Amino acid sequence: MNHTLRMSKLTLGLLTVLAAAPAFAQSTSAGVGGQVTSNAGAPVVGAEVVITHTESGTVSRATTDASGRYVARGLRVGGPYTVSISKPGEGTKTEEGVFLSLNQVGTVNAALSGDITSLSGVTVTAAGPSVFSSESKGIGTSVDGRKLEVAPKGSRSLDDVARLDPRVTVTDQATGAISVAGVNNRYNAISVDGLSQGDPFGLNANGMPYTGSPISVDTIAAYDIKVSDFDVSQDVVGAAINAVTKSGTNDFHGSAYYVYKKADSMVGSRDGEDYDAFGKDTTKGITLGGPILKDRLFFFGSYEEQEITEFGGAASSDGLATGAVTQSEIDQVSNIARDVYGIDPGTYGAGGVDLTNKRYLGKIDWNISDNHRASLTYQQTEESLPQPYDSNSNSIILTSRWFTKASETKNTSLQLFSDWSDNFTTEAKVSYQKFEQISGASQDLPAINVGVASTTPGSTNGVRFGEDRNRHENAIDTKKLTASFFGTYYAGDHTIKGGVDYQNTEAYNMYGRDLHGVYSFDSIADFAAGNYYRYDVRRPVNGFTEDDTAASIEFSQISPFIQDTWQVNNNLSITYGLRMNIPKAKEAPPRKPGFEETFGFRND
C-alpha cells in the first residue's frame, strides 16, 4: 500500500512538472518588409522585390501591394543581404549590406525616382534595416552580428548573452541559471534551431539539462531574447531565449579554438580570497561549413570538448578535518570491508570533481527553390559529473559512496519555410528529443554506515561507504516529439497569423531508494562482528519487480492559435488573438483496491 501511495504522488508530481514545460511555435528565421513609393510619394503597386543572401545565393521574391507595401519571411538570419526593388517606368533601387535579426522583420523602404537610363542600377549602401518598426512586438533584446562577436563570454554559456538584457538576472553564475522578474528558471523557454534546450524532466536547479552549456557558443549566429512577447504563438511564462546556429555558405569557412581559464590566477578575487569555484576550465573545438551544391545545398558542423577540474570548489569541512573521525579509524573500517566482507570501499581523499562535456552539431540547409527553403539540424550533448555525497562535519565518505551523473541528449529538427504567394507564408517544424540521465556508482553495493569513537550510538555518522541510498537505482529517460505549423497572411493593414503546436512526451523515472539495503553499525567492533543495529531495505511487494517501482507516463498537448495585428496607422498597431492549450494524459495513475479506505479518502 505504501508502494501505491508513493507511485501516485510521484506520477502526479511528474505531470505537474512536465506540464510546465512550454510548447511553442518559436520562429527560427528573419524577415524584411517596407513600403515602396514613387518620386512624388505615391505608393508603387506591383514593384518586384528581390532579396538575395549574398554569401549563399539564397533568393526570395515579393511584390508590393495596393499600398506599396511588401514583406518576405522565412529568411536566413544575418546577412549581408542585397535588396533590389524595381518596376518598369518607376525605376530601380538597390540596397546592400542589409542584416536581418532573428524573429524580427527589418524595414527597408524605397523611393523610386523614375525610369531614367543613366540612373538605373544605382547602388545605395545601407547600414541595415531598422528594428524599431511596427513589426517589432514585445519587450526583448536581439544579439547578433558584431554585437555578438564582441560580447564577453566568460562562462561560454547562454547566460553570458542573456544577461545583456537588463531585465535578466543570473541567479547562479556557476550553473548559468537565469531569472526574469523573479520567475523560477524552470519556466524559461530556451531553444536553438527550434530544439528545446530546457530541462526535459525538471530536476536540474538551473532549468537546463546540464550543469554546463547545452550547446557550443561558437556555433550560434544570433539570439532573440524576449522578456515579454505579445504573440499568442508563444506560450512562455519566463524568459524566451531563441537562438539559431550558423549555416554553410558558398565559401568554405571554419575555425579551431582552444580556451583556457584558471580560477586562482585569471579570475578576480572574491571577499579578499582567490576565486575557487573551479580549478581549470579548458575548452577545445572545431567548426566547418561550406557548400555541397553551390547556391543550393550547404552544411555546417562542429565538435567541442570541455573539462572543468575541481568543479564546485573546495569541499566543505568533513569529519577528518574537525577531528570527529581519525585516519586510523578510516583505515580500520577499510581493512574490515576488504578482508571480512570482500568489499572494495574505495579510498579517502581522492582528487576533486571533474566536469566533462562533449557537444556535437550537424546542420544541412537546402534552397529548394526561390519560394521554399528547408533546414535539418542534429545536436548531441554528453555530460559526466562525478559527485561526492553524504559527508558532514561528523563523518567522512569513501569513494565508493561517490556517484556519477551521466546525461545525454539527442536532438533532431526538420524545418520548412515556404512562400506560397506574395501575401501568404508558412513555417513548419518537426523535432524529436531523447534525453537520458543515469546516476549511480561503479559498484552495486548497499549503503554502509560505521560509527566511530566520537559517534553518538544510533546515528549514522562516522565512516560512510557503499552506494549512496538515493542512487541504488536512479534513471531518467524522456522522449519528446514536437511539431508546429503556422502561417502568416498579409491583408492590407492586417497581418493574420494562425497555426497549431503539438507535443507528445514520454517520461520514465526510476528512483529506487534503499533497493540494495542500508546497514548501520554503532562501532567498528560491531562492523567487524556483523552486528548492525539497523537495516533498511525497500523492495517491491509480491508480484512486482524493481522496474514496477518506476514512474512511467505519457501525455500530449495540442495548441491551436490565431491572432491579428492591425496596423491602425504609422504610430499605432493593435494585436489580439486566442490560444488554447488542450492537454491529454494517456492514462490516469492506477487505482489500487483498498487505497481510499486505508487512508480515509472517499471513493464516491
Image: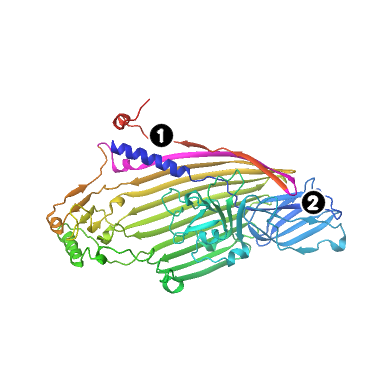
Element under label 2? loop
Residue 427 place in picture, x, y as percent: 62, 47
Residue 404 place in picture, x, y as percent: 34, 57
- Whether residue 63 is visible, yes or no, is no
Label of residue 588 in the image: 1
Residue holding disc 2: 47
Residue 130 place in picture, x, y as percent: 70, 57
Describe residue 534's horizontal placement relative to residue 436 as left or right: left
Q: Is residue 163 magenta?
A: no
Indicate the quadrant containing the C terminus: top left, top right, bottom left or bottom right: top left
Residue 316 place in picture, x, y as percent: 32, 63
Indicate the quadrant containing the N terminus: top left, top right, bottom left or bottom right: top left
Residue at the extreme front: 271
Q: Nearer the viewer, residue 424 or 178?
A: 178
Please provide the residue range marked out in magenta: 542-571
**In percent of the image, x 23 and y 57: which residue is there?**
461
**In percent of the image, x 55 and y 64: which residue is there?**
288
User: Which class describes the residues within 10 Å of circle 2: few (<14), some (14-19), or many (20+)?
Assistant: many
User: Which class describes the residues within 10 Å of circle 1: few (<14), some (14-19), or many (20+)?
Assistant: few
Question: Which is more foreground, mark 2 or mark 1?
Answer: 1
Q: Is residue 551 magenta?
A: yes
Q: Nearer the viewer, residue 229 or 360?
A: 229
Describe residue 95's horizontal placement relative to residue 332 as left or right: right
What type is the residue that disc 1 sits on?
Answer: Ala
Secondary structure predominantly adopted by residues drawn in magenta: strand
Describe residue 525's horizontal placement relative to residue 169 as left or right: left
